[in-house]
Structure formats: structure tokens, C-alpha cells
């Protein structure tokens, strides 16, 4: 359980990718290697103990599940994704807060990307083809759009993509990482934009 310092009532909770959503006035609870499935099994409430005065709460999970878990059983990645997102939305919208947000997953980089062993699971940098994992990503977003009623869905800008629709290596940490480069964080680009509507985009990241 995280014991938050009483500095702010705005929190982003997620896996290690969530550090890119730092903004002044926000706490970021980044939980390395934590899958969406794992945090749902533990309960989202387990990340929020001892902090009842929350005005805005955002969640950024799912990238690890797409990379390593949803495609490990052949032929089931579509239903696995739908089931996981249904659990996610239900858990988020059951929380007793009015201003809730869920980030869509990142684009999928080309399989040739060299990753440190810390990004591997059971000796593999990912499970499934690029096409299968990208299908999971798209289904994940479609299901968020379809199922959410209270939480806003926060989308990424297409400026992160290369000409093939993959996550651009230029936007990723050097020399090898699964994470975004700090130069592509919203705040560090000089743009701070908190979406107010479910269909909002982080489209001004790279204006």
C-alpha cells in the first residue's frame, strides 16, 4: 500500500509507463512490472489507501499485458483483451470519485527493437506477432470507448507513430527501452493539457 504525502489531490496510478504523465501538482504512483491483470486481482483500492481527498484520478495500465500476456495462448488474444478491459472499466468506475480517467495503451514498436533483459518475461521480449499485439491495442481502446460511462478515455496523439503506424524509435528512450523518451512526455514538451471530455485527445503534445 502506498502512503501518499499530502501534497496534491490529483493522482496518476500505473505501471512504469505512467511516469510520463507527470505534471506539476500531480502525484504519480508508478508500480514497475505491475500488469493490469495483477492490479485488478489486488484491487485498485490497494493503490489508494490513506488518501481519501482525491479530486482527479487517472489509471495507465495495460501495456505490459499486451506485450507479454494477452497473446500467449494461441487464438485467444481478442477475447482475452475484451475480458480484461471489461474488468478494468468495472473496477475504475466502481471507485467513489467523480473525475476518473483511463489512458489508452501505447502504440507497438517494431519487433527489431533491442530491449534490456529487464523488459523480458520468461526469456522473451514479447509474445505474439506485431499484428496480434496491435490488434489487442486497438480492441483495448474500442472496448474502453464502448464500456466507459463515467471515466474519460485519454488518447495518445498519432505523432508518436512512424510511417508504418508503429511506435517510433525516435520517441523511445535511448539506447533501448520500452518507455517513452522524456522529450516526449506531455509536460516536458511544454504542453500541459488535462482532458475534460471522454473523447479528448492529447493531440497538442507536439504542437
Image (tube, rainbow, N blue to C red):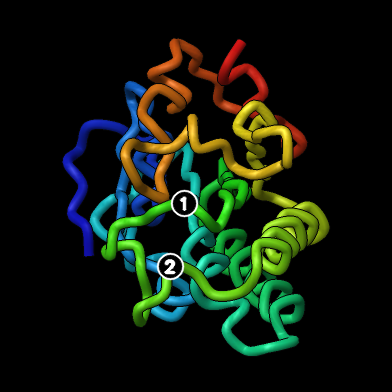
Relative to 120, does residue 138 appear above or below in the rendering? above
Q: Which residue is under mark 1?
A: 113
Q: Which residue is under mark 2?
A: 125
Give yes or no for contact between labels 2 and 1 (Cβ–Cβ under 8 Å).
yes
Q: In the displayed structure, does residue 92 sit left or right of residue 56?
A: right
Indicate which disc, 2 or 1, sits on the residue closer to the N terminus: 1
| Residue 84 placement: quadrant | bottom right
Q: Which of 104 and 183 is in front in this view?
A: 183
| Residue at 49% over, 45% down | 58
| Residue at 68% over, 88% down | 74
Q: Distance between the residues labelled 2 and 1?
A: 9 Å
**Residues packed near mark 2 inside 10 Å, few (<14), some (14 to 19) or many (20 plus):** some
Q: Which of 111 and 136 is in front in this view?
A: 111
Give x and y (percent) for residue 153. Answer: 67, 44
Q: In the displayed structure, does residue 5 sit left or right of residue 175?
A: left
Most extreme residue toward the front, as rendered?
A: 112
Most extreme residue toward the right, as rendered?
A: 146
**Residues packed near mark 1 inside 10 Å, few (<14), some (14 to 19) or many (20 plus):** few
Q: Which of 157 and 134 is in front in this view?
A: 134
Question: Residue 24, which numbered label?
Answer: none
| Residue 132 placement: quadrant | bottom right
Q: Quadrant of the N terminus?
A: bottom left
- The answer to whether residue 120 is seen in the rendering is yes
Q: In which quarter of the image is the C terminus?
A: top right
Give x and y (percent) for residue 52. Answer: 34, 50
Give x and y (percent) for residue 169. Answer: 50, 37
Amino acid at each position: 500500500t502506498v502512503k501518499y504525502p499530502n501534497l496534491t489531490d490529483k493522482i496518476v496510478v500505473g505501471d512504469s509507463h505512467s511516469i510520463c504523465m507527470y505534471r506539476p501538482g500531480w502525484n504519480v504512483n508508478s508500480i514497475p512490472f505491475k500488469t493490469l491483470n495483477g492490479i485488478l486481482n489486488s484491487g485498485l483500492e490497494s493503490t489508494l489507501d490513506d488518501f481519501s481527498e482525491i479530486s482527479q484520478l487517472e489509471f495507465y495500465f495495460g501495456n505490459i499485458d499486451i506485450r507479454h500476456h494477452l497473446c500467449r495462448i494461441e487464438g485467444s488474444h481478442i477475447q482475452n483483451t475484451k475480458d480484461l478491459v471489461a474488468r478494468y472499466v468495472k473496477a475504475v468506475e466502481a471507485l467513489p470519485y467523480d473525475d476518473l480517467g483511463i489512458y489508452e495503451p501505447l502504440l507497438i514498436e517494431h519487433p527489431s527493437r533491442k530491449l534490456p533483459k529487464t523488459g523480458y518475461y520468461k526469456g522473451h521480449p514479447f509474445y505474439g506477432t506485431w499484428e496480434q499485439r496491435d490488434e489487442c491495442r486497438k480492441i483495448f481502446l474500442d472496448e474502453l470507448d464502448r464500456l466507459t460511462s463515467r471515466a474519460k478515455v485519454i488518447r495518445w496523439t498519432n505523432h508518436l507513430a512512424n510511417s508504418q503506424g508503429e511506435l517510433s524509435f525516435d520517441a523511445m528512450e535511448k539506447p533501448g527501452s520500452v518507455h517513452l523518451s522524456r522529450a516526449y512526455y506531455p509536460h516536458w514538451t511544454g504542453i500541459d493539457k488535462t482532458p475534460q471530455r471522454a473523447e479528448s485527445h492529447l493531440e497538442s503534445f507536439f504542437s
